[in-house]
Image: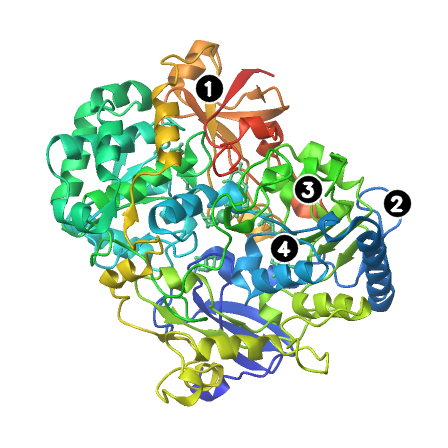
Amino acid sequence: MAEDNFTQTAGADGLHRTYCRLCEAQCGMIAHVNGGRIERIEPDREHPVSEGHVCIKGTSFAAVTYDPDRVLTPLKRIGGPGEFAPVSWDEALDDIAARLQAIVAKHGGAAIGSYKGNPASFATLHSTYGALFLKAMGGFKNFNAVQIDTGAKNLAQELVFGSGVDWTFPDIERCDFLIMIGANPLVSHMSLVAEPRARERLDAIASRGGVVAIDPRRTETARRYEHVPVLPDSDAWLVGAMIAHIFAKGLESRTVLEERTTGWEQLREALAPLTPELAEKRCGVPAETIRKLAERFAATPAAACYGRVGTNRGRFGTLVNLLIESLNVIAGKFGVQGGWMTGLAPIGVANSPPAHPRYGAMRSRIGNLPMVLGSTPGGSLAAEITTPGDGQMHALFVDSGNPVMAYPDGETLSAALEELDLLVSIDFYVNETTRHAHYVLPSLTFLEREDLTDYWVRNAPRPWVQFSPAVIEPVGESRHEFDIYNAILARMGLPALFSDPKARSNEAPALMDVADRMLRVGPFGDGMGDKPDGLTMAKLRDEHPSGTRTADHFDAAESWQRVWTKDGKAQLWHEVTQAEIARLLAEPTERAGDELLLFGRRKLGSLNSWMHNVERLVRSETPSLMMHPRDATARGFADGQTVRVSTATGAGEVLLEVTEEVMPGSVCYPHGFGHSGGWQRANALPGININLIASSRPEDWEQVSGNVHVDGFPVRVEAA
Ligand SMILES: Nc1nc2c(c(=O)[nH]1)N[C@H]1C(S)=C(S)[C@@H](COP(=O)(O)OP(=O)(O)OC[C@H]3O[C@@H](n4cnc5c(=O)[nH]c(N)nc54)[C@H](O)[C@@H]3O)O[C@H]1N2
Ligand SMILES: Nc1nc2c(c(=O)[nH]1)N[C@H]1C(S)=C(S)[C@@H](COP(=O)(O)OP(=O)(O)OC[C@H]3O[C@@H](n4cnc5c(=O)[nH]c(N)nc54)[C@H](O)[C@@H]3O)O[C@H]1N2
Ligand code: SF4
Ligand SMILES: [Mo]
């Protein structure tokens, strides 16, 4: 189609340049609109980074926008869970505001909580204004996916580099040797690295030096590159032994250690007993493989060791991540081109110290755990509601989330949600969590909303930024979350989000004006006019509708300027490191019983719990429990039979798949299935919510980060 068929007016006929907000790749897309409706979605070949890359989820997204099961008016609960009747916005908002006021008057702001799920991190400033909304009422209990996703890494970064949010990531554009632990980028499209064409980058690294996937499953990524099978929940042994071997062989980067770090000698001493032979017994990786891996890593100047969700949800998540950060520093890969680095977000002042509370500054009411990045441990949501006493939660907003599916023991959480005085959901679906709501407030899908790539592009090996106008007008009576929160605050007589406390008027600034200002004062902005070549939102919209590169690359060496420890040095020794290494080394050698270690997997056509209502994505979807033939034979199981998988928390019946894809001693099942929300197709799919059998007892979590334990927990498997 000709260039003049492009338009930026919401709902206008023609082609709309936009980008996908489902995963961190944020691929450029072109939506075809006819008669105000999106007819189809194609890749945007002119996008400066995705260059025509998309996946089936992005191009199927209009099926979500026009899903017949979508919530299009506010709903009020009229009976049991999931029984709703439509109400007007005014009726819903008036009642919500009045109830909140009563709850605050009686119990104080601590009684109100907010859970913001994964999609909130793809919407402009969503997490920020969501937290401000809570703060305006005196609340501070911000729940989210942190403690089931990144929490252990956030904490490790904070302890080593002084900031939990200056994410460290591998420079996969210029790397020659990449070790990936607990990541499957060929399916997930890379997490904590914004690079839509990751596969090409990884192929190039493989041809220059090597890509190694350390994973208990022979994943799509492991099959394409080198695979090192490892037992679930044992990576601390492996990475610890790699560091020990590097020191033993004198392969460490002495200049870096002496000039830019503290505590390396203590770390060396503490890890000395952790020989590759000892590690082999615990993690199942041959000692010789560990030595080779360490030597290849140390010997390649442009190398990085990257850990992702598979390293975050074991019993030693923080330690594994501390060791990964340390390994990169010790071998001289941090702050090096093609190595391990941090980047710059396009909004906010560049190179500014972290704004989040320091480790240990806030502790949770339940489990007395540190609130990493100020987040209340997500696993404690149910207990926060049901545990009486000071600070008990009586009202909750669930915005873009589904904790009943996302976190362990959703059954207990479902029951607890019923005890709330007020549960408000902001979502366009009734999901397994929001079916318990008193009100469901319909939100926009990303195609109905303007956005800026404000957050994840800070981790881009090829940095870019894009603004997308709304492609279509809001469907039904749906509203933007920002407007919903402001409407409630106004009814409570509280100031609007981002409003100037000194201004007399209480008018809400437009969200995009706030973001524009932050972009303009940011590292690539026009400095409010001082730097005419710099970016503004208007310039992005008018001159770069497919987005624009902000730099060739971030300067890797600058990563050292974003080390926020007091002395600016990487801190390789900390009381947490010390205690966690001691705890690891004291682990009993043998595990009792014949339990298998359960871990998860993601699927290309699936996104956590919420894309299962799209026919095209789930047509032949049957989740299975993968088990190695050795373990199946020992139990007399055959491929395709139904088995019962159980723990002390719960049990479920699942389809067995006997395959050499998984390590002996482990079993694998995807999360996000077993639906009972307001979606017809998803509810009809086979499979169970595997999180129902994971423990929500705080004593079973990783104690230093509060991360729950959903990868590598022991399960019994019996004939059904
Ligand atoms: N298609 C699709 N893409 C997605 C998502 C999705 O649901 N579907 N979700 C998005 C989200 S929210 C995120 S956070 C990212 C996550 O992105 P990734 O981290 O790449 O996600 P996974 O595919 O879950 O990869 C985790 C890997 O860890 C392995 N693993 C499990 N336990 C262990 C262990 O103890 N040790 C080791 N070494 N490995 C282990 C698993 O076998 C798995 O291969 O993906 C994003 N992209
Ligand atoms: N066992 C196990 N559990 C896991 C994982 C695992 O690998 N294994 N992965 C974990 C990870 S990494 C994550 S990130 C979490 C995800 O956990 P959550 O974020 O809590 O859950 P999601 O399944 O992503 O549900 C997102 C909800 O947001 C809604 N939504 C989508 N877009 C928007 C929007 O623009 N606005 C609003 N208001 N709503 C929207 C969807 O309809 C859906 O109901 O799950 C975690 N749970
Ligand atoms: S990889 Fe797929 S889901 Fe992720 S941003 Fe691109 S199109 Fe969207
Ligand atoms: Mo995630």
Pointers 1 and 3 in contact (C-beta within 8 Å): no
* Residue placed under numbered mark 3 in the picture: 683
Marks 1 and 3: which is nearer the front?
A: 1
Measure the C-alpha gap from mark 1 to mark 2.
41 Å
* Residue placed under numbered mark 4 in the picture: 400
Q: Earlier in the sequence, mark 4 or mark 3?
A: 4
The residue depicted at 19 percent of the width and 29 percent of the height is 289
Q: Residue 576, position in %: x, y?
A: 40, 35
Respond yes or no on whether mark 4 lies under 8 Å from ligand 2: yes
For label 1, the crowd category at 10 Å Cα-Cα, with few meaning under 14, some 14 to 19 and many 20 or more, is many
* Residue placed under numbered mark 2 in the picture: 79
Is residue 694 visible from the viewing direction of this image? no
- Asked which quadrant contains residue 545, the reply is bottom left
Q: Residue 426, position in %: x, y?
A: 70, 58
Marks 2 and 4: which is nearer the front?
A: 4
Q: Which amino acid, mark 3?
A: Asn
